[in-house]
Amino acid sequence: MVLMSTKLQNIGYNFIYSSDVKQLFKTLVGDTREAMTIKYCYAYTISHD
């Protein structure tokens, strides 16, 4: 019984950890894409002034 609950806890921790990592990755990718878009628009505006 102790083994079972430990196993469940580990699965729970792994799930939380992996979803945190996914969220972090999503945020990083989103921020990077946004920054690149802003940079591109800025460069476009300057070159077409």
Image (cartoon, rainbow, N blue to C red):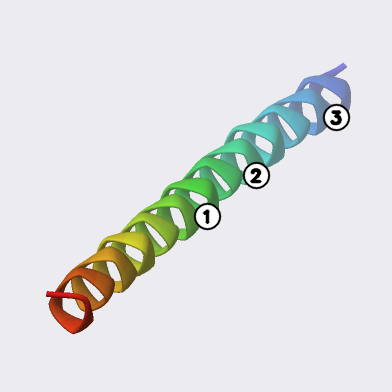
Pinpoint residue 12: horizontal percent, then vertical percent. 69, 27
The residue mark sitting in front, 3 or 1, is 1
Q: Residue at x 78, y 20 (%)?
A: 5
> From this viewpoint, which residue is outermost toward the front?
49
Q: Secondary structure at mark 2?
A: helix
Q: Earlier in the sequence, mark 2 or mark 3?
A: 3
Label 2 sits on residue: 18
User: Residue pushed farthest bottom?
Assistant: 47
Residue under circle 1? 25
Say few, some or many: other residues with alpha carbon within 10 Å of mark 3 (under 14 / 14 to 19 / 20 or more).
Answer: few
Q: Secondary structure at mark 3?
A: helix
Give the CA distance from mark 3 to mark 1.
33 Å
How far apart are the alpha carbons under marks 2 and 3?
22 Å
Label 2 Cα crowd, 10 Å radius (few <14 / some 14-19 / many 20+): few
Callout 1 secondary element: helix
Q: Which of 48/11 is in front?
A: 48
Quadrant in which the N terminus appears:
top right
In the orientation shown, which residue stands out farthest toward the top? 1
In the image, is 36 to the left or to the right of 29? left
Q: Residue at 26% of width from left, 61% of height from top?
A: 38
Question: How far from the left and from the top, in percent, is residue 28?
Answer: 42, 58
- Does residue 44 appear to the left or right of 45 in the view shown? right
Tell me if label 2 and label 1 are in contact, CB under 8 Å.
no
Amino acid type, callout 2:
Ser
Q: Amino acid at mark 1?
A: Phe
Q: Position of residue 6 (x, y in %)?
A: 75, 30
